Image (cartoon, rainbow, N blue to C red):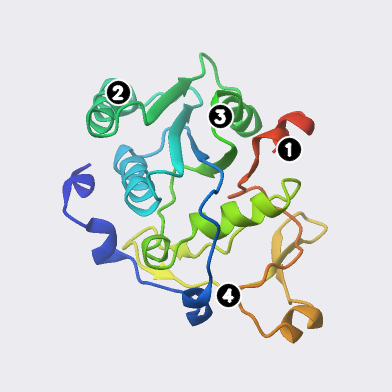
């Protein structure tokens, strides 16, 4: 867990990937608030702390209403008392920001997501795995803002931003290109080429319609309620 305490650890490890057209984007000031849900089961404590720290440091405070941890009945000891201590430390600096939901038995990935959604109180909820880390682009050019702006335009959309890969052994960030998601008959995820209509826009930041593979998916809390929490 020492990684959490190293100053600016994420800035020293993660590269900055962005499109220069991001600099030209402007967003409304009256954006909806967001709840970030992190789900885990026997995740390394240091990884969870890195995720929490990056979310706090790289999301505008006025937009981030809460971070909700959902523990699907972990057995690791450091995810009990030690995690509770870290939550208290975070909340001492950011009162009421962190909450934790603990399952009393293993209920699986889908129910963990639903539990996080049920505990959320912001306008928008983003449900993520706990082994993520926000890129510096969140603070340099904003990433919460384009997500929330798109949902503000149409509350029926579910956003799946491009996310890069962090190598497990050295935490090097590997860039992933913009692509539509898909899957084969064995249900393996595939990256599909983008349609000609998207290229015709000549805007690398333009949204593209895509199947949704439930890795990172901010959507309106109202929408989640209307699809029975199946987000």
Q: CA distance from mark 3 to mark 4?
A: 29 Å
First reached walking from the N terminus: tag 4 or tag 2: 2
Q: Nearer the viewer, residue 225 or 211?
A: 225
**Which residue is depicted at the point 71% across and 58% down?**
188
Circle 2 residue: 84
State the quadrant of the N terminus: top left
Does residue 38 appear in the picture of this structure? Answer: yes
**Which residue is depicted at the point 58% across and 75% down?**
177
First reached walking from the N terminus: tag 3 or tag 4: 3
**Which residue is depicted at the point 49% across and 60% down?**
143
State the quadrant of the C terminus: top right
Q: CA distance from mark 1 to mark 4?
A: 28 Å
Q: Secondary structure at mark 3?
A: helix
Q: Would you call the spot at circle 1 few (<14 residues within 10 Å), some (14-19), or many (20 or more)?
A: some
Q: Nearer the viewer, mark 1 or mark 3?
A: 1
Left or right, 81 with respect to 7, comes to: right
Left or right, 8 with respect to 64, comes to: left
Circle 4 residue: 177
């Amino acid at each position: 867990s020492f990684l959490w305490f190293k100053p600016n650890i994420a800035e020293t490890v993660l590269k900055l990937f962005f499109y220069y057209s991001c600099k030209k984007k402007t967003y409304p000031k009256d954006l909806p608030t967001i709840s970030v849900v992190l789900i885990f089961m026997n995740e390394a404590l240091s990884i969870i702390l890195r995720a929490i720290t990056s979310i706090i440091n790289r999301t505008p405070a006025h937009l981030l209403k809460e971070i909700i941890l959902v523990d699907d009945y972990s057995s690791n000891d450091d995810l009990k008392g030690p995690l509770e201590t870290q939550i208290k430390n975070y909340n001492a600096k950011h009162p009421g920001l962190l909450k934790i939901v603990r399952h009393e038995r293993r209920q699986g990935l889908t129910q963990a997501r639903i539990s996080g959604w049920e505990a959320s109180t912001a306008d928008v909820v983003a449900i993520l795995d706990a082994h993520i880390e926000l890129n510096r682009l969140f603070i340099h050019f904003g990433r919460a803002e384009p997500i929330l702006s798109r949902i503000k335009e149409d509350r029926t959309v579910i956003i799946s931003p491009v996310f890069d890969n962090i190598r497990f052994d050295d935490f090097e960030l590997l860039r992933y290109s913009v692509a539509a998601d898909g899957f084969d008959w064995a249900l393996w995820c595939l990256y599909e080429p983008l349609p000609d209509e998207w290229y015709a826009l000549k805007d690398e930041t333009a949204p593209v319609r895509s199947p949704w593979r439930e890795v990172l998916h901010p959507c309106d809390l109202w929408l989640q309620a209307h699809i029975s929490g199946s987000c």
